[in-house]
Image (spheres, rainbow, N blue to C red):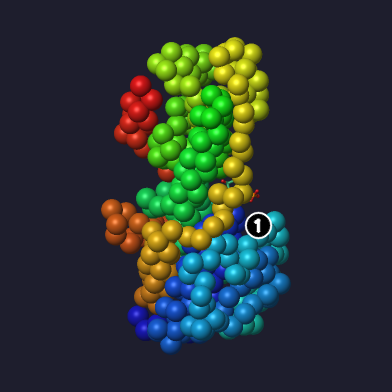
Amino acid sequence: MANTIKKIAVLTSGGDSPGMNAAIRSVVRTCAYHSIECIGIYRGYEGMIEGDFLEMDARSVKGIINKGGTILKSARSKEFRTKEGREKAHTQLVKAGVDAFVVIGGDGSFTGAMVFNSEFNFPVMGIPGTIDNDIVGTSHTLGYDTALNTVVEAIDKIRDTASSHNRLFFVEVMGRDVGHIALNAGVGAGAEEILIPEEDLGLDRLLESLRRSKASGKSSSIVVVAEGDKIGKNVFELKDYVEENMSEYEVRVSVLGHMQRGGSPSCFDRVLASRMGVRAVEGLLNGESNLMVGLKNDVMTTTPFNQSVKGKMPINKELLRVSDIMTV
Ligand code: F6P
């Protein structure tokens, strides 16, 4: 089919993640490579509704591959969830001569793109950009690898002071309602316990495990808690509970928060972003649409939006077993 796409827009949407700028760079440069015009859309769907656009060329994206965050800014748009909002956005795109767009974001952003495509038959491709790694259809979402390294580095630092004072630290990490960051960074940082929403360890078993660690000679401990953990208490209540039931430990809490979303992207994320940008743009030029690009066994593939937005990437059971063994 002869390609009718002459101008492609790119936007970042939802929670930002390291690597988004590398993906913007790849989309813009792949357009330039194919002599296709490219438009940047500021602030996600909010900017699309307002027509907050920027002409971009290969030079517009120089020096950003190593920058965290997103030069196009990001936002979560309530108005885009309305038909009127999407109609305004469509009018803006048509007025600007845009034929298709690439959205870099999470499952919420893809749901919006899917609805928009169904209403206007407007070609869209998605790049999974979120630190949570919770999207079906890719082994790695953009920013996840960088976030893991950020968390491991932070826990290594916390361990220095925990061991100096023989303390137990609860370290809360992001991930919304999945435990991928907690489990992988917890194993990587040698945490004594990891609490994730996918596995209900229970308070009694937590105390038992901490007592066993103490009895085996561990003078300090790190417990990594996923923010979506369902043990029934938030990380500060956990601290109080353990202090009340385990006099052996002084307990402290460290909530890592939004630092996990920042920082210069890892080489892995920069390369992943570059590959995803090429695949998304060339998919549009080949007539594809309504697909999320993803990595499967190190091969760039696509998954229909209506599958990638369903459910969450399941926790790796083999890694869960490794984690149990490592805390012997
Ligand atoms: O989805 C990415 C994420 O960082 C989650 O891990 C976290 O729960 C959420 O975004 C925080 O949202 P906000 O940016 O609105 O504070």
Crowdedness of circle 1 by 10 Å Cα count: few (<14), some, many (20+)? Answer: some
Q: Position of residue 220 (x, y in %)?
A: 50, 25
Q: Is residue 146 left or right of residue 256?
A: left
Q: Position of residue 141 (x, y in %)?
A: 44, 54
> Considering the image in quadrants, where does the C terminus appear?
top left
Q: Residue at x 37, y 50 (%)?
A: 139
**Which of the 4 quarters of the picture holds residue 280?**
bottom left
The answer as to whether callout 1 falls within 8 Å of ligand 1 is yes
Look at the picture and state if 104 lies above or below 192: below
Q: Position of residue 236 (x, y in %)?
A: 65, 28
Q: Residue at x 40, y 84 (%)?
A: 34
Whether residue 169 is visible to the viewer of this picture, yes or no, is: yes
Towards the viewer: 235 or 116: 235
Q: Residue at x 57, y 36 (%)?
A: 172
Does dot 1 land on a helix, a strand or a loop? loop
Towards the viewer: 146 or 130: 146
Whether residue 178 is visible to the viewer of this picture, yes or no, is: no
Q: Position of residue 204 (x, y in %)?
A: 52, 13
Q: How many marks?
A: 1
Q: Is residue 212 left or right of residue 243?
A: left
Q: Residue at x 50, y 35 (%)?
A: 159
- The amino acid type of the residue labelled 1 equals Arg
Q: Is residue 237 left or right of residue 114?
A: right
The residue lying furthest to the front in this view is 164
Look at the picture and state if 216 lies above or below 309: above
> Considering the image in quadrants, where does the N terminus appear?
bottom left
The residue lying furthest to the bottom in this view is 35
Instruction: Give the labeled residue for mark 1.
Output: 76
